Amino acid sequence: MRLGQVVIPKTYWLSLVNTTIDPTFLMVLVKTIWELIQHSRFNGFIKNEFGCGPESARDQEVQELLGARAQFPYCNPRTDPHPVRRVMLGLHLVTTLLEGSERMKDQFRAYLRREGDYGNDIIEFAEEVFRNINISDPPVCSMSEEEAEAMNGAMLMDLQAVLSVVLPGVVVEVGDVTPLQILHASRSRFVASISFTGTLA
C-alpha cells in the first residue's frame, strides 16, 4: 500500500483499512479533518450572525455513539481493529472538544477512561490533535481578499499539523488552495493539493 510516495508497511495502522471495501477511507479522513478546521474559524460567525451553535447537534451525535444507538464507521470495539478505532474515535472526541457542551465532553472522556490505558491513549491523541487546531473568530463579512487568503493559509497549516499527528512518521506537504470554478460555477468550493513524502521506519 502506498500513501503518495510513501510505502506503508504492514505494521502501520493505515494498512489495517481494507481499501477494497473502503477505497475512499483516506479521502474521507482528510475531508473530516479539513471540515473541523473550517468549523474552528466559522462557528463564531454563525453564532454571532444567526444566534445558533453546533452544541445540540454534536451532543446528540455523541449520545448516540456512547449509547450504541447508531453505527459510526470504525468505532465498534468488537469488530474494528484497535489502531483504526483509536484514530476514528479520537476524531469524534476532537469534534466534541470543538463543538460539544462541557457536559458531553466530560461524558465522552469518562466513557473512554473505562477502557483503561487504551481509552486514555485515545484521549491523549485527541487532545494533541485539538491543540493543533487554532480556533479563531475572524470578521468573515468584512475581510479583505488578502485577509481571506491569510486565513486559508493558516487553516492549511493546521491541516498539515493535524495530518502529521494522525499519520505519525509521514512527512505531509499541503499545497495551495485552488478554486474549482468549472465544477462548481454557482458555489465557492476549493480543494487543497496534499502530498505525502518521506519514509516510514
Image: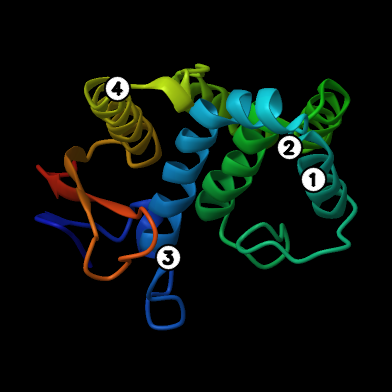
Label 2 to label 3: alpha-carbon separation: 25 Å
Measured along the vertical axis of the image, is residue 63 above or below residue 50? Answer: below
Residue wearing tag 2: 54
Element type at mark 4? loop
The reply to whether residue 133 is in sight is no
Residue 90, image quadrant: top right
The reply to whether residue 22 is in sight is yes
Numbered tag placed on residue 57 in the rendering: 1
Mark 3 belongs to which amino acid?
Phe
Q: Is residue 57 left or right of residue 98?
A: right
Looking at marks 4 and 2 on the same chain, the residue that comes earlier in the sequence is marked by: 2
Label 2 to label 1: alpha-carbon separation: 6 Å
CA neighbours of label 3 inside 10 A, class few (<14), some (14 to 19), many (20+): some
Label 4 to label 1: alpha-carbon separation: 32 Å
Residue wearing tag 4: 144
Q: Is residue 7 left or right of residue 14?
A: left
Element type at mark 1? helix
Label 4 to label 2: alpha-carbon separation: 27 Å
CA neighbours of label 1 inside 10 A, class few (<14), some (14 to 19), many (20+): few
Measured along the vertical axis of the image, is residue 65 above or below residue 22? Answer: above
Residue wearing tag 3: 25
192 and 43: which one is in front?
A: 43
Measured along the vertical axis of the image, is residue 146 above or below residue 193? Answer: above
Looking at marks 3 and 1 on the same chain, the residue that comes earlier in the sequence is marked by: 3
Looking at marks 2 and 3 on the same chain, the residue that comes earlier in the sequence is marked by: 3
The reply to whether callout 4 and callout 2 are in contact (CB within 8 Å) is no
Q: Position of residue 72 (x, y in %)?
A: 69, 61
Element type at mark 2? loop
The reply to whether callout 2 and callout 1 are in contact (CB within 8 Å) is yes
